[in-house]
Amino acid sequence: MFWVNKAHAGNTFMPPQASNFAESVDTLYGFLYYSSLISCILVIGGLVYFAFKYKRKTASDKTAYIPHNALLEFLWSFIPFVIFLVVFAWGWKIFYDMRSAPKDALEIHVVGQKWNWDFVYKSGRKTSSEFTIPINTPIKLIMGSRDVLHSFFVPSFRVKQDVIPGRYTSLWFTATKEGNFNVFCTEYCGTGHSTMLAKVKVVSKAAYESWLENNPYKGLTLSEVGQKVYAGRCIACHNVTNVKKIGPGFAGLWGSERKLTDGSTVVADEAYIRESILNPNAKKSVGYEEAVMTSFQGQVSEEELTGVIEYLKTLK
């Protein structure tokens, strides 16, 4: 079912390893598989052996009194405990690495909807059901949904992330092999769920630059879209400097910590900016307790939301 290169055609047990995470995930999976197999053989084999060895031969046979062995009882509890701790630490390390995207990662916006995937690059180029990335380059996918819950899964990269309506999620990876690799939706999202497929094309860096320059979508970049949205909808209440107007100034807002009225803090990332536009009263910052801003729910498109976020990133 997987799209693989001819060089990997014989690999039927697992899809080809094509990302920086694939080997570490497969190694952990192999450890779990073989440790479980050995445990199964020891437990089931021991059960069968003792069942025959100590089978009652006559009705008068009585089991001899066997005192407990403290060392044995300790070991059969302690050894699995140590194995579980090792697996937990090992899995946590892989999970942490998957959640810590490099700051210089190439960002691509992904939008899921019934039943296809759309991809938007910072240059303004858009593709559907297929996206192209350069090899050996960190890629960060910033994902949202237009309708219901989806899940973005690339088996050959060993990465998966839920795509949730009303908020942003993200994942990152570095592709290590050129070729075409399948993308699946692994969260049931309706009758067309099984056909919600896409393809990742991993190419050389030179081929990627050439592909990016041959942009069939003429028009504005995402940050330019955001600048137009600002000029038409935001300028009355916000400055592009850090000077407060009715609302906060936008310069330096991106990535800063915002202190909320409930005493907590939140980082001004994609999810926070999106929520502040669509539901501005969900998280009120200190100094802006009064509900002045109205919701833009249904008044801005996903492209406009993404554009505003990208524009804010340019305001230092």
Image: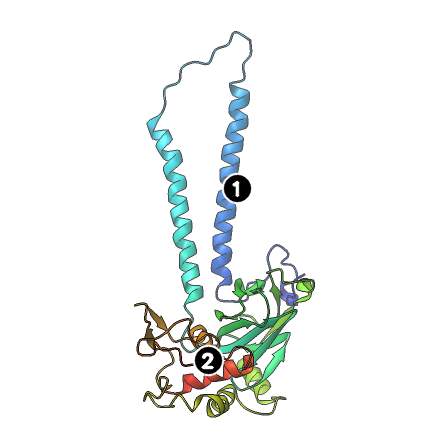
Which residue does the image show at 55% across and 27% down from the upper left?
48
Q: Residue 264 carries which label?
A: none
Which residue does the image show at 50% across and 40% down from the upper left?
38
Is residue 206 depicted above or below 114 in this figure?
A: below
Q: Report helix, strand or loop for mark 1.
A: helix
Whole-percent x, y for residue 173 in the image: 49, 69
Whole-percent x, y for residue 258 in the image: 33, 75
Q: Is residue 32 visible?
A: yes
Q: Report helix, strand or loop for mark 2.
A: loop
- Which residue does the numbered mark 2 point to in the structure image? 294
Q: Quadrant of the N terminus?
A: bottom right
Could you say which is closer to the camera, residue 10 or residue 201?
201
Amino acid beneath label 1: Leu
Mark in the foreground, 2 or 1 = 2
Quarter assignment of residue 207: bottom right
Q: Is residue 172 visible?
A: no
Q: Which of marks 2 and 1 is nearer the N terminus?
A: 1
- Which residue does the numbered mark 1 point to in the structure image? 37
Whole-percent x, y for residue 126 in the image: 60, 82
Could you say which is closer to the camera, residue 82 or residue 163?
163
Is residue 97 depicted above or below 273 in this figure?
A: above
Is residue 49 depicted above or below 6 in this figure?
A: above
Could you say which is closer to the camera, residue 38 or residue 217?
217
Amino acid beneath label 2: Thr
105 with respect to 55 (left or right): left
CA separation in Å, label 2 and label 1? 59 Å
